[in-house]
Amino acid sequence: MPPECLHFTADDEANTLLARDPMALLIGFVLDQQVTVQKAFAGPLALRERLGSLDPAVLAGTDLEPAFRQKPAIHRFPGNMAARVQAVAAHVRDRYDGDAARVWTDAADADELRANLAALPGIGEMKIKALGAVLAKRFGVEAAEGLIPWHPTLGDVDSAESLAKYQALKKVHKKQWNGPAPAG
């Protein structure tokens, strides 16, 4: 059962959209780079408000850069992120018939889910772990259980307070989290 909302922003509407629209969740993870978590995950709502849709076919067939550059900009790198979101949308449109949830519902196990996520433009190893943790811990996706890393992720965020705690820990331990699990 999906959650009512994900507590990744200060905006209830954005948080609800992330929980209810799999494409919004994917876009948020794509945007989660060199901006705050709140900024990244508010992006899907801003994009939907500016374009009227998060449908992968619409996103794939639209020049997204003007929407990304409109003030306030959706991301600090609007051109690059517009292109990346458009590429993800085209991938979802072409590979999953426009159904973003199929990225994880079609996966039989963690290896297949990892491959599905890795095939998405803008999704690297850290995002695979973080998105896997969200899918496992917040959405109950069994195939994602094997992707949960040893360190805290957005999958552990279930309130504004836990988001603040996660962000504080992330600042302190980011370099350590990028490497292998510590011994002992």
Image (cartoon, rainbow, N blue to C red):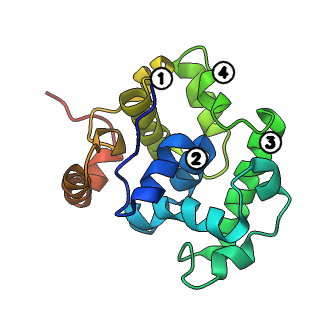
Q: CA distance from mark 2 to mark 4?
A: 15 Å
Please tell me whether residue 6 is drawn above or below residue 75 in the rendered image: above
Under mark 3, the amino acid is Arg
**Picture coordinates of residue 133 (x, y %)?**
39, 34
Under mark 1, the amino acid is Val
Front residue of this view, candidates 163 and 121 = 163
In the picture of the structure, the residue carrying the numbered disc 1 is 141
How crowded pointer 3 is (Cα within 10 Å; few <14, some 14-19, many 20+) is rated as some
Dot 2 or dot 3: first in sequence order is: 2
Please tell me whether residue 168 is drawn above or below residue 146 in the rendered image: below
In the picture of the structure, the residue carrying the numbered disc 4 is 106
In the picture of the structure, the residue carrying the numbered disc 2 is 26
Residues marked 1 and 2 touching at CB (< 8 Å): no
Under mark 4, the amino acid is Asp
**Picture coordinates of residue 27 (x, y %)?**
59, 53
Q: CA distance from mark 3 to mark 1?
A: 22 Å
* Residue 5 visible, this orientation: yes
Dot 1 or dot 2: first in sequence order is: 2
Q: CA distance from mark 1 to mark 2?
A: 15 Å
Q: Which mark is residue 164?
A: none
Instruction: Label 2: state its secondary structure.
Output: helix
**Picture coordinates of residue 157 (x, y %)?**
29, 45
Dot 3 or dot 1: first in sequence order is: 3
In the picture of the structure, the residue carrying the numbered disc 3 is 93
Under mark 2, the amino acid is Leu
Dot 4 or dot 3: first in sequence order is: 3
Instruction: Label 3: state its secondary structure.
Output: helix
Dot 1 or dot 4: first in sequence order is: 4
Q: CA distance from mark 1 to mark 4?
A: 11 Å
Q: CA distance from mark 2 to mark 3?
A: 13 Å
**Residue drawn at point x = 41 percent, y = 27 percent:** 136
Q: Residue 68's quadrant in the figure?
A: bottom right
